[in-house]
Image (cartoon, rainbow, N blue to C red):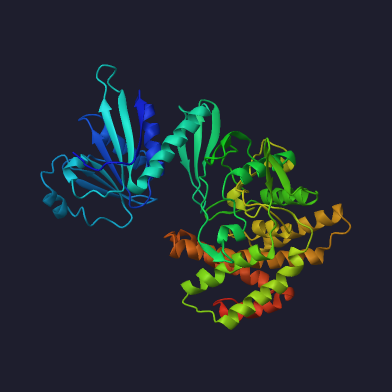
């Protein structure tokens, strides 16, 4: 028997196969690279069936062959999120056999799913998740009792599974089918919930703890004004809907736990093809959304719940500079480039000069990630309501040009100049038609400055995701972002910055910026 004690656990009754599969999704969603999941319990209780369903779920392919490893003892699967090693130690007679099988030399970052873990005493880590399945022969054949236990560092994640299951039940969706959705670069998780004709999205966003102090005793997230809870998301969703824009309705919320059930706006986006390219009509509508939003006088304080308000932070100089500093901290070091103290001082001096007139302009709601991954197309709706908005929890009171730059220099999609410039012109003409005091020249200078700031920040973020977080998939976007950066720095108003980047950032050279 396994002798590890302590941890966090919960029990659940599984009356049928559908309930077992829902528990499987819960456990699979909590797994991280390097985890060990042990499957214990009665002979014939369904441990192999559970493991097989989990591997297919993690693979995103219900058709792949997942044979029982009873005779091979271990089977490895290269899956999108991480490798999975499926082991069955029923036939193992001693720990020496495990060493011969290479159980102590598994693929880096692999999740290991172990059936009959009691045969592996001494080889299992103290930090692991255990699922125990037991039969209930007096009830019905498919009925099971299950206990999920998290030991060591896995205990909080097992607590989270129980919390999420309770929240879903309170929302009336405990029997819903749950489909994992692709997330963003954050720690948030999303599932589509399907129950009959009802569709909703589960947003699982536990409160993000402050990181270490990086400047003046403050962590990066506080200086950059990043949301640390779901409260800003709820506030902005309600605020955007009050402005007759399409943000998801909040259907059920536990803001303390960071759990939301929100309206499902579908999955049709504003790009198409492989590689994806802008659908111009949809980008035009997205531009019109920004025109409509920026033409209004918008409040800086939004209601969230009775006696709860959210004050939208200001996109100030400190936030702008700490974001652009990511280029120095992550992107250039990844290229083996060391920036001297004098060059660093020149860098910040150039950016302060460029950003000062931009930051002092009248502010609006700046959603910060107004680009194709967060824009949905709802053709059944009318005019600007056809654009569905997501991922706006980091919104700030800032310059209107920032979101225009986010859209027209999309970090994940090529927006060629022959598409960017007419769309920029569409925005400028509409703003000018609605406001005689709108100055196109001032706006264009703000646009190129913020596009360069955003590109510099994203280069740093994507380098950090690779170096620190082991997520190299974002590197494929870097050539595109570097191209956008060159495009913006070529504007005459950024001559000082363009000179600095030309001296210190490889591959950047002067291009001709056109805006008409």
Name the quarter where the N terminus is drawn. top left
Q: Position of residue 62 (x, y in %)?
A: 36, 38
Q: Residue at left 84%, top 57%?
A: 432
Q: Quadrant of residue 162?
A: top left
Answer yes or no: is residue 72 visible: no
Q: Quadrant of residue 265?
A: top right
Q: In the image shown, does 83 or 322 lie closer to the viewer?
A: 322
Rendered position, 265 above or below 373? above
Q: In the image shown, does 208 or 387 lie closer to the viewer?
A: 208
Rendered position, 30 above or below 133? below
Q: Position of residue 270 (x, y in %)?
A: 62, 48
Image check: 23 left or right of 237?
left
Name the quarter where the C terminus is drawn. bottom right
Q: In the image shown, does 414 or 371 lie closer to the viewer?
A: 371
Q: Residue at left 65%, top 80%?
A: 499
Q: Position of residue 30 (x, y in %)?
A: 40, 43
Rendered position, 320 above or below 114? below
């Amino acid at each position: 028997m396994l002798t590890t004690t302590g941890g966090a656990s919960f029990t659940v009754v599984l009356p049928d196969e559908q309930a077992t599969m829902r528990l499987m999704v819960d456990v699979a969603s909590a797994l991280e690279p390097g985890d060990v999941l042990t499957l214990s319990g009665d002979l014939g209780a369904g441990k192999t069936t559970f493991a097989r369903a989990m591997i297919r779920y993690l693979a995103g392919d219900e058709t792949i062959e997942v044979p029982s490893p009873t005779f091979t003892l271990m089977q490895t699967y290269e899956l999108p999120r991480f490798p999975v090693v499926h082991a069955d130690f029923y036939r193992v007679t001693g720990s020496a056999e495990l060493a011969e099988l290479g159980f102590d030399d598994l693929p880096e970052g692999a999740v290991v799913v172990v059936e009959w873990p009691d045969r592996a005493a001494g080889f299992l880590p103290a930090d692991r998740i255990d699922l125990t399945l037991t039969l209930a022969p007096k009830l019905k054949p498919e009925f099971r009792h299950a206990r999920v236990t998290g030991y060591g560092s896995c205990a909080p994640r097992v607590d989270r599974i129980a919390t999420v299951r309770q929240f879903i039940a309170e929302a009336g969706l405990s029997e819903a089918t749950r489909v994992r959705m692709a997330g963003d670069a954050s720690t948030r998780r999303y599932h589509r919930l399907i129950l009959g004709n009802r569709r909703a999205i589960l947003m699982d966003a536990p409160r993000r703890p402050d990181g270490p102090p990086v400047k003046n005793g403050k962590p990066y997230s506080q200086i950059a004004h990043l949301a640390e809870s779901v409260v800003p998301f709820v506030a902005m969703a309600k605020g955007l809907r009050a402005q007759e824009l399409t943000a998801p309705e909040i259907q059920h919320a536990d803001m303390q736990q960071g759990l939301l059930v929100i309206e499902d706006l579908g999955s049709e986006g504003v790009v198409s093809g492989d590689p994806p390219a802008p659908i111009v009509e949809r980008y035009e509508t997205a531009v019109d959304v920004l025109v409509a939003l920026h033409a209004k006088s918008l409040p800086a304080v939004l209601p969230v719940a009775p006696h709860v308000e959210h004050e939208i932070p200001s996109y100030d100089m400190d936030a702008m500079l700490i974001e652009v500093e990511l280029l120095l901290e992550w992107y250039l070091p990844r290229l083996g480039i060391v920036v001297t103290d004098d060059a660093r001082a020149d860098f910040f001096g150039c950016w302060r000069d460029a950003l000062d007139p931009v930051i002092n302009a009248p502010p609006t709601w700046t959603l910060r990630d107004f680009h194709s991954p967060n824009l949905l197309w709802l053709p059944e709706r009318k005019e600007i309501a056809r654009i569905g908005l997501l991922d706006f929890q980091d919104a700030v009171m800032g310059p209107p040009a920032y979101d225009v730059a986010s859209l027209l220099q999309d970090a994940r999609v090529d927006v060629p100049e022959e598409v960017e410039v007419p769309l920029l012109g569409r925005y400028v003409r509409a703003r000018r038609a609605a406001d005689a005091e709108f100055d196109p020249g001032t706006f264009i200078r703000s646009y190129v400055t913020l596009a360069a700031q955003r590109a510099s920040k994203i280069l740093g973020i994507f380098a950090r995701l690779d170096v620190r977080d082991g997520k190299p998939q974002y590197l494929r976007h870097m050539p595109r972002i570097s191209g956008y950066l060159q495009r913006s720095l070529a504007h005459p108003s950024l001559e000082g910055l363009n000179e600095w980047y030309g001296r210190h950032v490889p591959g950047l050279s002067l291009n001709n910026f056109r805006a008409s």
